[in-house]
Amino acid sequence: MRLAVTGSEGQVAASLVEAAQGRDDVEVVAVGRPVLDLSRPDTVFAALEAARPDIVVSAAAYTAVDQAEDEKDLAFAVNATGAGKVAQAAARLGVPVIHLSTDYVFDGTKDGAYVETDATAPLGVYGASKLAGEQAVAAANPRHLILRTAWAYSPFGKNFVKTMLRLASDRDEISVVADQWGNPTSALDIADAILHAAAKLRDDRNFSGFGVYHLVGSGDANWSGFARHILDTSRELGGPYARVCEIATVDYPTKARRPANSRLSTAKFASVFGWTAPHWRRSTEEIVSRLVLGATRQASIQLNQ
C-alpha cells in the first residue's frame, strides 16, 4: 500500500513517514513544496500522479490561526481551494482521499463532546477556511474520509509540547489558559490511526463508511493541565521544568477567538475502524521522553567532542 501525504514538513506527514519505516506492507511518500504547493493549484495533480498512490492523505494546511485573520485569501486558497484540488486529483487517479480537518469548525458552546453531526460554526478565518475545505473535499471525491483532529503535538515541527519545554528552559513560571478544554492528540497516534483506516480501505473494496470522523487522543484537558503534565514529566526525566500559573482566556488576548470547548467524541471512528487512541497523558509522556532524552544525549555528545 502506497500513501502519498501532502505537506512534507508537517507533523502528521513526518509521523506517517516514521510509522512506515521498517514495514514492508506500506510505503509513505511525502509530497510538499515546491513540487506540490496548495497555493498553486496547477502543481497538485502532476505531483500526486508522479507519487503513484493507492491512497492520498491530505495533511498540508495553513495553520497560523491568528495570522489567518489578516491573510484570509491565503488561508482559503490553501485550506479550501487547495484541499479541494487534492481531493479532485485523488478522484482523477481513482483513489480515496483522507483529509485532516480541525476542532475549530465548532464554536465551543456545547457542554459535552462534539459529534460529527453537530452544527458547525467556526469563530475565525482559520476554522472557516478548514470547514470550506471539508466541503470542497466532499464535493470533489465521494471516496473521502475527513478526520477532524485537535491540539496536535509530536517530536516534529512546532507545537505546544515543544513550546512548553523551550519556555521552561529559561523561566520559572509559565502562564497558561485554564478555561479552554479539548483533547491533546499525538501526531504519532494520528499517523497510526490513518494507517489503520487506510488498511481497511485497501482490504474492504465494498467499504461504505466514507464521510466525516473525529480523531483525537483519549481523555480531555485544559491547556494548563496539559502544560503541567508536560513539565512534570520533563522534570522526572531531568529536563526543564517551570511552574504553571492558570489564567483566563481574557488575560491572554489573541487576534482569533478560540472555542472554549473543543472536545470531540471518537465513538464513530472506534465503531467503524476498531481503533481508539491511547490516553493523551501516556502519549504525552512518550513524546516528552523522546524530546528530553534526545536533547540530553545531544548535549552529552557535544560535551565529549
Image (cartoon, grey):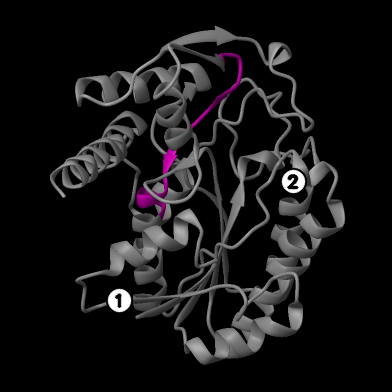
Residue 105, percent across and down? 70, 42
**Labelled pair 2, 1 in contact (Cβ < 8 Å):** no
Above or below, 291 against 261 in this view is: below
Residue nearest the observer in this picture, 29 or 156: 156
Circle 2: residue type: Tyr
- Label tally: 2
Q: Which of label 2 and label 1 is nearer to you?
A: 2
Q: Position of residue 272 (x, y in %)?
A: 42, 55
Rendered image: mark on residue 126: 2
Q: Position of residue 267 (x, y in %)?
A: 45, 41
Q: Is residue 141 visible?
A: no
**From what the image shows, is residue 204 above or below residue 236?**
below
Q: Is residue 35 left or right of residue 255?
A: left
Q: Nearer the viewer, residue 94 or 123?
A: 123
The answer to whether residue 210 is magenta is: no
In the image, residue 55 sits, relative to residue 125, either above or below, namely: below
Is residue 219 shown left or right of residue 25? right
Quadrant for the N terminus in the image: bottom left
Which residue, given by chain and number where applicable, does mark 1 sit on? 26
Seen at 21% across and 24% down, the residue is 238
**Lower position in the chain sequence, tag 2 or tag 1:** 1
Report the magenta residues as a range: 177-190
| Residue at the spot 71% in from the left edge and 76% down from the top edge | 85
Magenta residue check for 186: yes
Q: Residues within 10 Å of mark 1 (few under 14, many from 20)?
A: some
Amino acid tagged 1: Val
